[in-house]
Amino acid sequence: MRAAVGAEPEGTRGHQALMVIAQNIDQAESGEAPICQDTGMPTFEIKVPLGLDQIWMKGRIREAVAEATRRGKLRPNSVDSITGKNSGDNLGPGTPVIHFEQWERDDIEMRLILKGGGCENTNVQYSVPVELAHLGRADRTLEGVRKCILHAVWQAQGKGCSPGALGVCIGGDRTAGYQHAKEQLFRTLDDVNPDPTLAGLEAQIMATVNGLGVGPMGFGGQVSLIGCKIGALNRLPASFFVSVAYDCWAFRRLGVTLDAKTGAIRGWLYREGKSELMLAPGQADAGFPRTGREIALRAPIDEATIRSLEVGDVVLISGRMYTGRDAVHTHLMKHEPPVDLRGGVLYHCGPVMLKEGERWRVVAAGPTTSIREEPYQGEVIKRYGLRAVIGKGGMGAKTLAALKEHGAVYLNAIGGAAQFYARTIERVDGVSLLEFGTPEAMWHLETRDFPAIVTMDAHGNSLHQVVEESSARALAGMRG
Ligand code: SF4
């Protein structure tokens, strides 16, 4: 990420986004707080010597996950898929994910990855041969695999909080392919693939992919990917899958080796450079890197002010903001809002919150991926008079039309910058719809100088559309 910051020219949107991310990384480090509010699906990959009691180990892992959730280190992220109820402790069928494998060593190796929903939703699996937009046919060759990987980065745009890292599996069946792709994400970014063919493909991807110009958060720029790790599995003669696991810049992994007899920690993995900060000491709270062109807004906001904004404007929002994501949007399609939203700002955010006495404290509060609300957003803006929607990754044509018709803007906050944004929230003034669980409730937040970029304005312009089209042209130039 330090290399990424250095690659984006100062004063560009990409550089501003990365500077926010850099501050966020240092703030999370110094506060031992979640680097992003979406603490993801806890996924454990464990190697054990023969004869170890895996049932006992699973029990301890589940206890630890529940405790980390209680302490506000993990957001309650386990939702019953039938009832929609959040279990509240990150435990439930399939949560956490725990895989064991036996090996011939006498110690235990345990690795954990926390991969959030935004990047998980951008995972993709290709069944080749396949026709790919802008790239043409991808065959059952390494060249076809190359095309699939480039296509995966292009279609993710900023939705997975770019710059991201890819784990790729060539072959396998659908299930094993995705699993092996995710396993590649446990490799360190600077390792070299022991298979020279795959090492060559990884190098080829990294040498060209940033030419797509997707850039940080999909704002356009020089850095779209920070790593690409490729593995391969044998396949059935009739199948040829290319599975791509996309991880965001937050790229949270941790590992430990344990003495199998005593449980003592023998060593940590991924802890190199732990004490190294991204920025110089004292810069972690420098705030949004300003250019002097920022526009201060106070919510509620009037229509004329909103209509005067244009794509590319950077705004600093103070005043009341309400959170609302999937459950709130579904609710608002059938019920009146619990608060007056006229002139209001709706933040696509599922924060990590802690109750301290009678008051709630924001532990982490970055934006969530907005495109999920595309089926509802235009209608919600129209019905309730919202003037601004904040999220990440952009929204589609329906929302763009509604912004124009009803006088509203879409603001892109910096994805994953949960500590940074938590510091812009002065207090929590209340909460509605808490029965949906803390990530899905409607929180009433009082903010000060909350920075975001107008990426869809009330004149029908969308930065996301522009970047998608220009990166599509770049992609077409990589057809080979
Ligand atoms: S950084 Fe972005 S993609 Fe990653 S977990 Fe956070 S919100 Fe999701």
Image (cartoon, rainbow, N blue to C red):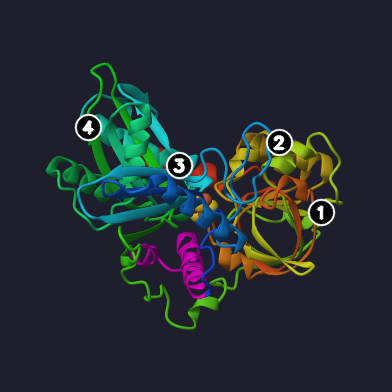
Q: Which mark is residue 60?
A: none
Residue located at (38% from left, 46% from top): 54
Q: Is mark 3 within 8 Å of ligand 1?
A: no
Q: Amino acid at mark 4?
A: Glu
Q: Is mark 4 within 8 Å of ligand 1?
A: no
Q: Amino acid at mark 1?
A: Gly
Q: Is mark 2 within 8 Å of ligand 1?
A: no
Q: Is 157 situated above or below 135?
A: below
Disc 1 element: loop
Mark found first going from the N terminus, 1 or 3:
3
- Tell me which secondary structure the magenta stretch mostly adopts: helix
What residue sits right under mark 1 in the picture? 343
Image coordinates of residue 208 in percent, x first then y, are 27, 47
Where, by quadrant of the figure, is residue 263 drawn? bottom left
Whole-number angstrom distance, CA of label 1 to CA of label 3: 32 Å
Q: Which mark is residue 143?
A: 4
Specify whether 193 is left or right of 71: left
What residue sits right under mark 2 in the picture? 376
Residue located at (83% from left, 51% from top): 341
Mark found first going from the N terminus, 4 or 1:
4
Whole-number angstrom distance, CA of label 2 to CA of label 3: 21 Å
Mark found first going from the N terminus, 1 or 2:
1
Image coordinates of residue 448 in percent, x first then y, are 70, 70
Where, by quadrant of the figure, is residue 231 drawn? top left
Q: Which residues are magenta?
A: 1-30
Specify whether 227 is left or right of 94: left
Q: Is residue 450 visible?
A: yes
Front disc: 1 or 2: 2
Question: Does the magenta portion include 302?
Answer: no
What residue sits right under mark 3 in the picture? 156
Q: Is 386 situated above or below 25?
A: above
Residue located at (56% from left, 71% from top): 288
